[in-house]
Amino acid sequence: MSARELPHAVVIADDEPLARERLRQLLARHTGWTIAAECRTGPEAVDAILAHQPAVVFLDIRMPGLDGLEVADAIAGDASEPDAGPAIVFVTAYDEFALRAFDASATDYLLKPIDRERFDRTIARLEARLRSGQRSERPSDVGAVLGELRSDLPPLRRFLVHTPRGYHFVDAADVEWVEAEGNYAALHAGGRVHLVRHTMKALEARLDPATFARVHRSAIVNVARVTRAEPLGHGEYRLHLRGGARVDTSRGYSENVLALLKD
């Protein structure tokens, strides 16, 4: 069998055994596909995706450890190579209203309980893309979807970050402030800086508003880390953070800053 004829590898990530079984049964009806791994938690999914480099991931939105969108962010390719990672098909139980977020961003999804005809159409689209050398039509930054679904997802409690030693977690409570870095966000925590593939809009939506406040288009601060606010005039401030960092606010986020100072 030539390399071109090798089956496409698939990773299934869902914490529900019946959901995994349903996907397994539906996929068995299609030749040219093989299941490389099945996972029940977000961290397991990240490990399996990095180990097997599948062509496609069927990814549940709600999973223990990391939700599906966090997994997608963690394994996303470099911004200069939007097709470097696997195609992702989100598996979700969200209602029709929330699914508009997926439709608007051309993100593939399957609605639970999974309909066979819808699954077959998804496979047909995936096969067409793979034949053309493309991956998914999803945006390179899944934070756009995340922002639309923020009301249904719990606040981020930790981040999965990549270091030379591998992947590990950074607790959100340990993040002093967040700075925009192009297509990424830089987490400043414990004297280190960690890049994660999130937009500032997505992070603002997912971080606990009782703990974090956006004070600039390019900055979000942990309010518990603010020790002093130095007025700069015209409604702007320089926030001094525990640990020595200084973050300037902007007038566009003056309401957030005033609420921070009041508290």
Image (cartoon, grey):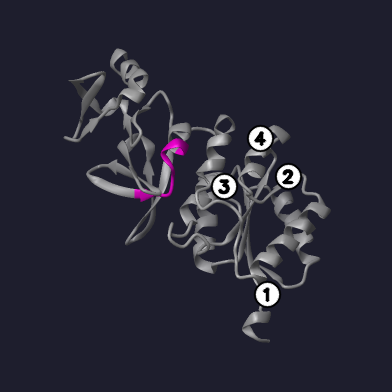
Q: Which of marks 4 and 1 precedes in the sequence?
A: 1
Q: Nearer the viewer, mark 4 or mark 3?
A: 4
Q: Find disc 1 in the rendering and name its residue.
A: 7
Q: Find disc 3 in the rendering and name its residue.
A: 68
Residue 111 is tagged as 2
**Residue extending farthest front:** 234
Q: Which of marks 2 and 1 precedes in the sequence?
A: 1
Q: Find disc 4 in the rendering and name its residue.
A: 98
Q: Is residue 202 left or right of residue 2?
A: left
Question: Would you say the residues marked 1 and 2 are in contact, meaning their CB atoms lie under 8 Å apart?
Answer: no
Residue 143 location, x and y as percent? 50, 43
Residue at mark 1 to residue at mark 4: CA–CA distance: 33 Å
Q: Which secondary structure lies at badge 2?
A: strand
Q: Nearer the viewer, mark 4 or mark 2?
A: 4
Relative to the observer, which residue lies in front, 48 or 218?
218
Residue at mark 1 to residue at mark 2: CA–CA distance: 25 Å
Residue at mark 4 to residue at mark 2: CA–CA distance: 11 Å
Give the crowd class for mark 4: few <14, some 14-19, many >=20 residues within 10 Å. Answer: some
Residue at mark 4 to residue at mark 3: CA–CA distance: 15 Å
Q: Which of marks 3 and 2 precedes in the sequence?
A: 3
Q: Which of marks 3 and 4 precedes in the sequence?
A: 3
Give the crowd class for mark 2: few <14, some 14-19, many >=20 residues within 10 Å. Answer: some
Residue 198 location, x and y as percent? 44, 45
